[in-house]
Amino acid sequence: MIKLSQKNINLIPKHIDIPTYNRDDLQEGIIHIGVGGFHRAHQAYYTDELIDIDNLDTKEWGICGIGLREEDRTMYQALKEQDYLYTMMIKSPDRKTKPMIIGSIKNYILALDNPQKAIDKIAAPSTKIVTLTITEGGYNFNESTSDFDFTNPDVQWDLAHPGRPKTVFGYLAAALKKRKAEGRRPFTVQSCDNIQKNGMITRQMLLAFTYQLDAGLAEWIEKNVSFPNSMVDRITPVTTAEDIEELKTEYHVDDNWPVVCESFRQWIIEDHFVNGRPRWEKVGAQFVPDVEPYEKMKLRLLNAGHSLLGLIGTLFGHATIGEAVSDPLLKIILRNFWDEEVTPTLEPVQGIDLEEYKERLIERFGNPNVQDKVSRICSESSAKLPKFLLPTIKEQIKRGGPIDKGTAVIAAWFRYLELDGQHDVGHTYSIEDTMYDLLQEKIKESGSENPVALLQVEEIFGELSNSKRFVKQYCSMVNELRNHGAHQMIKRLVNTD
């Protein structure tokens, strides 16, 4: 058994790829805020692969992770103990696993223990790009108003204590203020989260915050900092104890926290960087003038499809996305949702055959070697649904098009919240959502015949509750779920006896 660490790297079994470059030579030119499974399976992997094939020209692109939350402490400790190395376990549909050691993360700072150290690191002259995976809810974006939420207590703290911030916006503002004061070039801020126009949203939110904090700094950021949009894609389930044990027993590597992912990966990036960038295109990333058609396609098909399978699949009693997509009823309603409601809202995407893309998604969802739990997909639905699903419903309402499959997902979410962990079929589950208390309050306000209180959460639904057509269909479906269950409703929607 080999304990993963830099000193043991050459003891790793020969059939497992390890970094061939000298990690001591790496400068930390990329700061990544929010080191989790997805970052380690996606951006950090692209960067590792690039350094490995082109290490003479890429020494400036090592990564320093930064954790802002107490929840980041476990990852920080796990990586620190093994010199920030970790194993990526690529799981293919043929049930084969390919482990490889990733070395592109060179350092990690837990900001809540030492805010100034994190600020100084982000502001350091060597920092050229700051990348983000802070989840959909981390952008402090009010969906109904498109405004920055200044009522957030952590935001109020940051405005009052700019030297000891808590939010990503406080840290970025503090670091950029230091760069400005020193007369240095700024860095690029690059979102890698599943949000349409993620770069534009990041820019909008940071500027709103900094104009409140320091108007002169905000004007400088507006003129000098770039925020490229990007679209990211790789299914990355939560690492399980079984994954860790498989790595030990089958490959003799002891890793505190390996990351598991599918073999597919995609990264579409707007080529707008103010202080240089890695040549990620050498390892498969695509740099394009306009990311929007790609991200719209991905968010409305893959991410909304995940939510459909997760929420309705939970009511069916399924534990994983693979189980859900293998259910004939769910597979039919998924394809109907994509074909009838989503596809008409999408523009042509250069280089993408939509029918092939949808078929590939079905294969990816059903990968028997990637046990992506429905609980992960359902978590933080209050932040996901407004970005992944509601835009399709809103657009179809304007077009006078079909909305029954999308509305069924919202009704399923209501029932998922109303059952509060108890399946109709007797299984239990837990709800993870930062808005849980408010959501449960609205569920309790919803009468037995007219469950509209949930729709009145403006930061989620905006003006959608004003659509009589949507509200009528939603209420009918909620009552159908209550009285007859999810199976009966889905059978009716797909016209299956």
Image: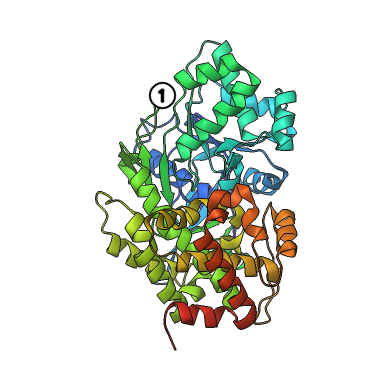
Q: How many marks?
A: 1
In the figure, 110 relative to 433: above or below?
above
In the figure, 497 relative to 438: above or below?
below
Q: Where is residue 79 in the image (x, y as percent from the top left)?
A: 62, 46
Q: Position of residue 94 (x, y in %)?
A: 39, 72
Q: Residue furthest front?
A: 468
Q: Please tell me which residue is depicted at 52% across the width and 35% down the height of the picture.
A: 202
Figure quadrant of the C terminus: bottom left
Residue kind at label 1, given as amino acid type: Val
Q: Position of residue 288 (x, y in %)?
A: 30, 39
Note whether residue 43 is visible.
yes
Q: Using residue 423 as the reference point, say whether residue 304 is left or right of it.
A: left
Residue identifier under label 1: 274
Q: Which residue lies furthest to the bottom in this view?
A: 497
Q: Nearer the viewer, residue 356 or 489?
A: 489
Q: Using residue 495 as the reference point, say whether residue 170 is left or right of it.
A: right
**Label 1: which secondary element:** loop
Q: Nearer the viewer, residue 469 or 43?
A: 469
Q: Using residue 103 as the reference point, say whether residue 269 is left or right of it.
A: left
Figure quadrant of the N terminus: bottom right
Colour scheme employed for the rendering of this structure: rainbow
